[in-house]
Amino acid sequence: MRRGFYTFTFAILITVGCDLTPKKYPGEPNIHAIISVDSTLVQIMVGRTVSVDDTMRLDTVIDTFIQIWDGDTIIWIDTFTFIPWNGVSGADVDLNQGNMRVTATEEQDARGYYNAAVTAPAPRQTWTLEITYPDEVVISAHTTVPGDFETISPLKDTICETDTLRWTPSQGAAGYMVGGIGWYTWEEEDTLIVDSSYLLDVLLSSDTTFLVLWFLEYSHFDSLYLLVSGLDTNAYDYMNYEYNYWWNEQRIEDYMHIDGAWGVFGSKNTVRSKVFLMEPPEDIHQ
């Protein structure tokens, strides 16, 4: 297991005192939450960094940080593989926007997962996340939701991978994430089966407001819609580091933007295209 982490993850070395061992290491605050204009539910993951020596549980999620003890050195590893979420129960978690204050409640069967029902975040609103850990450690983070925008092409009803998706700029967006959902059908024993799947997400910087739909090549979707999300600086920098995992030379602290904690508190504004029909592959690649 340890060999796998050395082989497949990018590590940054931090020298620490020799009296610190994995068993004594308490973990540092670790937070993950992204609010969106298309959702009235915000899930806030509250936890602490964990040791690679902790039990690996396959039912846990992504976006945490682990450390390996190697003599007198802790090797911090940022990874999005399945590793334990070291959730913290009993934290006070509040979301604030203007005069509104919403307290999140912890899920009964999910340690460290807190949910808040909010009025859907509006473009250009600034939200504050305040978390008080049971040991009285207080973490505060801020995000400003990117501005309104819209998709403007393609204008036709049927598309293929040579078409270009275009959208207007979103004020305050540091970058964009483009993806979508597609549907496809097939017959099985005289029964028509309909299924769907997510499209590949593509991350783009703020100076790019178009994307040639190359990821639809050889697609067997019958129909689909495309999603474009304008990301605030916090969300974009965090995702940019993860997407450019092997080549990113940033120091690990530079992209999370939460004082005193690891992770991310960001926001996004998402617009959806109309539903397109897909040109049949035999018509595209004959």
Image: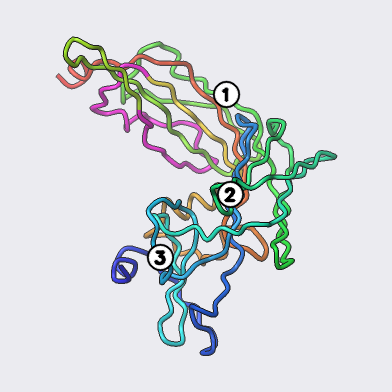
Which residue is labeled 1 in the image?
Answer: 150
* Marker disc for residue 113: 2
Q: Secondary structure at mark 3?
A: loop
Q: Marks 3/1: CA distance?
A: 45 Å
Image quadrant occupied by the N terminus: bottom left
In the rendered structure, does residue 198 fall within the stretch colored magenta?
A: yes
| Quadrant of residue 137 within the rendered picture | bottom right
Mark 3 in CB contact with mark 1 (< 8 angstroms): no
Amino acid under disc 2: Tyr
The residue segment tinted magenta is: 197-223
Image position, residue 61 (x, y; %): 45, 51
Q: Marks 2/1: CA distance?
A: 32 Å
Q: Is residue 266 above or below residue 147?
A: below
Q: How is the image coloured?
A: rainbow
* Marker disc for residue 55: 3
Amino acid under disc 1: Glu
